[in-house]
Image (cartoon, grey):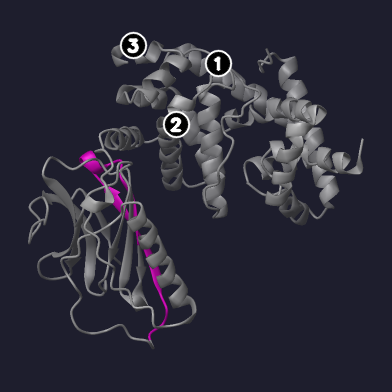
């Protein structure tokens, strides 16, 4: 047996329990393909690992979890066939990238996510541009994350909003969206502390129920993000229904 | 799937999932939801985040159900392995990695289906046996297994945590897994056929 074999054999247990360091994991995986004795060892050690998930004390999940899962499954399976890019309305987001340091990185990441999304069919029809009052370059850097919670048919939706305060940009990442009704689209709203909700874009989910939406507006003075279903293709000037997906902005 | 979903075998349930039958994922949750949620809570210590992880795990099974191969392991093992991996990724702040979650070479076959009382009893017996097996390990061996499996720490991190050389951690991990496997096989809990 070679020294390399002995070295890798000592790592098989770590590999099996999922605690090998990444580089080591790759080396062991390659080695296992060629070494029958280490494969047998891995199989033998794996017997014990297979039992470990049964150790925790049983905790009954909340009833809503089953409904979330079912709603998410229903949403993804009923999603429409993926559209061609030609059918998409895509306009580049108005992200300011003239600054440096961490803000540039974050904004670039947001743009990259959005660009990747565009390449794979993600897009948003911006109907609303920010008003005056550009972002301050002297205010403290700040990034906040908000979780969106759904009810009813949106109970299975997973969503988060990442707000880059300095850049006045919010990246809304949604998963497991059900297909909107026929001739309907989803519309994102910014709900201010006073006054009527502001339309922040319309969208339809991808075939897998996901969507990434970039909102080019400050969340200052906004108390909630909300999503409603509205008439296609342009949505409404005001929400026509009670939002079933929303995040409170604090 | 319909009203008989509770009586379906795992392969039949997987076929229902692959066919996009929503009743099948409901049945899967009713059958293994408590196990998956308990595991996620055990790892994360946070019921809210555990819900997210379990939902992700179920959706992965739902999405890839057509790739299920009963010769490689049970639906339950696939779900629990996926749940564990998602929970660890969440806990450690790691992005989801491409994993070989279907490459299961060993399994504890689920006994019973649906919500029949026998399933609850058999799971309680399994849990008791697993705890006895873990309890039979020397404390230092049990510690490295729990840090690795439930804590998601790498061997290098464990060596730093317990202040022993990396080689010692690897040795303890191997000894622990050898003993766990032997103990559980000796009590007929593991199906090696």
Q: Are marks 2 and 3 on the same chain?
A: yes
State the image coordinates of residue B78 (x, y, percent, origin top left).
53, 29
Pointer 1 chain: B
State the image coordinates of residue A207 (x, y, percent, origin top left).
30, 41
In percent of the image, x 48 and y 76: which residue is there?
A102
Neighbor class of circle 2 (other Cα within 10 Å; few <14, some 14-19, many 20+) is few
Label 2 and label 3: CA atoms lie apart by 23 Å
Label 1 and label 3: CA atoms lie apart by 21 Å
Neighbor class of circle 1 (other Cα within 10 Å; few <14, some 14-19, many 20+) is some
Q: Give the side of residue B34 with respect to residue A148, left or right.
A: right
- Look at mark 2 in the image and give the residue it sits on: B64
- Look at mark 1 in the image and give the residue it sits on: B122
The magenta stretch spans residue B6: no
Q: Which residues are magenta?
A: A139-161
Q: Quadrant of residue B9?
A: top left
Please name whichever residue, A35 or A85, is drawn nearer the observer in this view of the structure. A85
């Amino acid at each position: 047996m070679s020294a390399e074999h002995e070295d890798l054999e000592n790592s098989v247990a770590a590999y099996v329990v999922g605690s090998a360091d990444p580089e080591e994991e790759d080396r062991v995986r390659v080695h296992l393909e060629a070494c029958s004795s280490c494969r047998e060892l891995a199989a033998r050690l794996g017997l014990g690992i297979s039992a470990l998930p049964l150790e925790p004390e049983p905790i009954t999940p909340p009833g809503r979890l089953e409904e979330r899962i079912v709603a998410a499954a229903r949403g993804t399976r009923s999603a429409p066939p993926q559209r061609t890019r030609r059918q998409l309305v895509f306009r580049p987001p108005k992200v300011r990238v003239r600054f440096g340091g961490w803000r540039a990185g974050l904004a670039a990441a947001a743009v990259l996510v959005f660009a990747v999304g565009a390449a794979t069919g993600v897009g948003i029809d911006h109907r609303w541009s920010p008003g005056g009052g550009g972002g301050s370059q002297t205010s403290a850097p700040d990034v906040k994350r908000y979780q969106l919670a759904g009810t009813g048919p949106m109970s299975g939706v997973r969503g988060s909003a990442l707000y880059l305060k300095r850049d006045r940009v919010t990246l809304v990442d949604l998963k497991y969206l059900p297909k909107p009704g026929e001739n309907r689209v989803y519309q994102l709203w910014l709900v201010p502390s006073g006054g009527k909700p502001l339309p922040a874009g319309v969208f339809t989910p991808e075939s897998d129920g996901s969507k990434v939406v970039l909102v080019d507006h400050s969340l200052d003075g906004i108390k909630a993000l909300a999503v409603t279903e509205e008439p296609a293709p342009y949505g409404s000037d005001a929400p026509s229904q009670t939002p079933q997906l929303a995040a409170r902005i604090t | 799937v319909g009203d008989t979903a509770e009586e379906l075998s795992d392969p039949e349930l997987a076929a229902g999932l692959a066919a996009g039958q929503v009743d099948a994922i409901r049945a899967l949750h009713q059958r293994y939801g408590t196990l998956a949620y308990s595991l996620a809570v055990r790892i994360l210590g946070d019921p809210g985040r555990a819900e997210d992880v379990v939902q992700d795990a179920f959706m992965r099974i739902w999405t890839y159900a057509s790739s299920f191969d009963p010769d490689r392991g049970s639906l339950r093992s696939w779900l629990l392995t996926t749940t564990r991996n998602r929970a660890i990724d969440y806990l450690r702040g790691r992005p989801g990695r491409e994993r070989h979650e279907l490459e299961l070479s060993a399994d504890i076959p689920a006994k019973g289906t649906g919500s029949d009382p026998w399933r609850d009893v058999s799971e309680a017996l399994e849990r008791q046996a697993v705890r006895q097996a873990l309890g039979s390990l020397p404390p230092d061996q049990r510690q490295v297994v729990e840090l690795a499996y439930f804590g998601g720490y790498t061997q290098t991190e464990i060596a730093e945590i317990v202040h022993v050389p990396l080689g010692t951690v690897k040795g303890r991990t191997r000894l622990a897994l050898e003993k766990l496997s032997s103990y559980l096989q000796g009590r007929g809990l593991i199906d090696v056929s």
